[in-house]
């Protein structure tokens, strides 16, 4: 496994509870009781137990008694939130009722909203966490903790411009914060601002003494520098839709099929997703040994904004192979343009695979051969499913099987969408996301269901597959 990939796995846990070294932390805020004596008592509860539960019930009786004051309600809210933080290792659903009760007791409280956002972030519900962080930001626009968290959430949501805007502010306040510098560099990289990415990562190098982190950042810097030079010395052919670069000897392997396949893929994907790009797409063909110097070690190809990088094994001429890769990555590019990079990872990868299999195999239901045993043994016979909001974490896993599970879950969820609501639902969801709606709002527009409800329908559909 590469140093870069190891670091990405570590970074998935960047914000953790009670991290004494991190400059940006989850659950660092504490809602204080209104009664001073209770504030001192609250600090003594460092673990769950009957004592805390009994105290909460006592405060609950006072808070809901006739004539109870706001002071009573604030006291209860503070202890409820202490319990939430202490049991943050449980699912969000296990804590949701407590958080909602606390919110009803102390509405619009910025400390409560911060803790609520932290919990949602910790559980991978980035869109909803962003709503709470932005509420706090509107009330307290100079809070660097919140600015940092908005930047990190925006990165997770692939809104790289927003991530850059907020992480730049955060880095100005925390100039030696390794993780903020790394994510700022990653955001620059995703937006193809490679010089800026290198500059941010070089600062990150100075901010850490950890040799593994240093090795990973050096690898990231090398990737950015190779991207800057990726088209140097390549041959280039252009038509009205694409600019195709043939790096090294890749043109000898492809011959004249590149534009024929690109034309087929263009018509298939744009017709299916009802979107025609108004910019030319760069497609860079590499021989495999060159490609893996600048991409993930498990990738088949990658779409980066309006640039598609496609590896080819030396001497490999299969049109089906090239057609599937190009359909997959061109779909990512269309989704990127269509939604302003606001598409959740499961849907982004799901639609891309749906188009890939349609292009390569003649039907979106004809999946890759290495998927079949996992689908049969785990998803169908084993009745296992993957929560779609867990897809980003699984795709950053060190386990290839976990990565495959994430891709398969994304693909199957997209097939479920098509089965129940037709391919037109792809267009409707992407259109809504492009208008700035959340994935819950977009799903309701297209299917009448929010994500929780669709997850249940998807799991029911899997059981009958």
Image (cartoon, grey):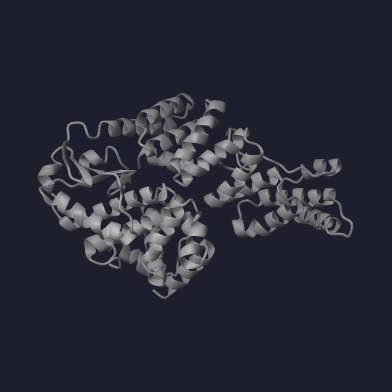
User: On the picture, is 340 further left or further right than 253?
Assistant: right
What residue do we see at 62% from left, 40% from top?
A: 137
Residue 14 seen in the current view = no
Q: Quadrant of the C terminus?
A: bottom left
Going 32% across and 66% down the picture, which residue do you hit?
Answer: 373
Position of 112 with respect to 273 (left or right) is right
How far from the left and from the top, in percent, is residue 15? 55, 41
Q: Nearer the viewer, residue 91 or 52?
A: 91
- Residue 194: name its quadrant: top left
Find residue 138 and report its image quarter: top right
Residue located at (47% from left, 42% from top): 155
- Count of all numbered marks drawn on residues in the image: 0
Q: Residue furthest right?
A: 67
- Residue 191's spot in the image, x, y percent? 38, 38
Q: Is residue 115 above or below residue 431?
A: above
Furthest residue to the top?
206
Q: Nearer the viewer, residue 413 or 383?
A: 413
Residue at screen point 25% across, 31% down: 229
Quarter of the picture containing the N terminus is: top left
Q: Residue furthest bottom?
A: 464
Residue 80 seen in render: yes
What is the quadrant of residue 160 in the picture?
A: top left
Q: Position of residue 209 (x, y in %)?
A: 48, 26
The answer to whether 347 appears left or right of 244 in the picture is right
Give above or below for 358 relative to 304: below
Residue 274 vertical placement versus 279 (above, below): below
Q: In screen coordinates, is 114 left or right of 398?
A: right
Query: x, y percentage for residue 7?
Result: 43, 39
């Amino acid at each position: 496994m590469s140093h870069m990939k190891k670091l990405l796995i570590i970074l998935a846990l960047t914000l953790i509870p009670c991290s004494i070294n991190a400059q940006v932390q989850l659950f660092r805020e504490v809602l204080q009781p209104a009664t001073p004596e209770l504030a001192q008592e609250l600090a003594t509860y460092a673990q769950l137990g009957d004592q805390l539960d009994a105290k909460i019930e006592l405060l609950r009786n006072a808070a809901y008694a006739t004539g109870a004051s706001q002071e009573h309600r604030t006291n209860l809210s503070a202890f409820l939130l202490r319990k939430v933080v202490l049991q943050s290792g449980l699912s969000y659903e296990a804590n949701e009722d407590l958080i909602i009760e606390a919110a009803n007791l102390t509405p619009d409280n910025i400390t409560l909203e911060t803790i609520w956002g932290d919990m949602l972030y910790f559980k991978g519900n980035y869109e909803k966490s962003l709503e709470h962080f932005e509420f706090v930001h509107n009330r307290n626009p100079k809070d660097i903790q919140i600015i940092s968290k908005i930047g990190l959430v925006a990165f997770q949501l692939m809104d790289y411009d927003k991530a850059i805007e907020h992480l730049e502010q955060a880095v100005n306040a925390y100039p030696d914060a390794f993780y903020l510098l790394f994510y700022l560099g990653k955001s620059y990289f995703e937006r193809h601002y490679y010089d800026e990415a290198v500059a941010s990562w070089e600062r990150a190098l100075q901010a850490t003494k950890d040799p593994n982190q240093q090795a990973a950042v050096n690898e990231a810097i090398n990737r950015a520098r190779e991207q800057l030079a990726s088209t140097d010395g390549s041959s280039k052919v252009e038509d009205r839709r694409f600019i195709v670069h043939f790096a090294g000897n890749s043109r000898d392997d492809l011959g004249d099929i590149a534009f024929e396949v690109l034309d087929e893929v263009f018509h298939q994907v744009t017709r299916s997703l009802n979107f025609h790009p108004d910019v030319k797409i760069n497609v860079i063909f590499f021989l495999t040994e060159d490609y893996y110097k600048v991409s993930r070690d498990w990738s088949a190809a990658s779409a980066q904004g309006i640039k598609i990088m496609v590896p080819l094994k030396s001497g490999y001429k299969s049109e089906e192979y090239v057609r599937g890769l190009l359909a997959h990555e061109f779909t990512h590019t269309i989704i990127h343009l269509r939604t302003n990079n606001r598409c959740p990872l499961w849907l982004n990868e799901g639609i891309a695979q749906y188009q890939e299999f349609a292009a390569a195999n003649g039907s979106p239901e004809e999946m890759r051969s290495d998927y079949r045993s996992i689908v049969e043994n785990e998803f169908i016979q084993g009745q296992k499913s993957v929560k779609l909001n867990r897809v980003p974490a699984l795709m950053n896993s060190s386990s290839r099987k976990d990565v495959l599970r994430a891709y398969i879950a994304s693909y199957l969820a997209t097939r479920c969408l098509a089965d129940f609501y037709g391919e037109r639902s792809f267009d409707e969801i992407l259109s809504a996301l492009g208008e700035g709606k959340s994935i819950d709002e977009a799903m309701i527009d297209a299917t009448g269901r929010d994500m929780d409800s669709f997850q249940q329908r998807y799991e029911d559909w899997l059981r009958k597959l």
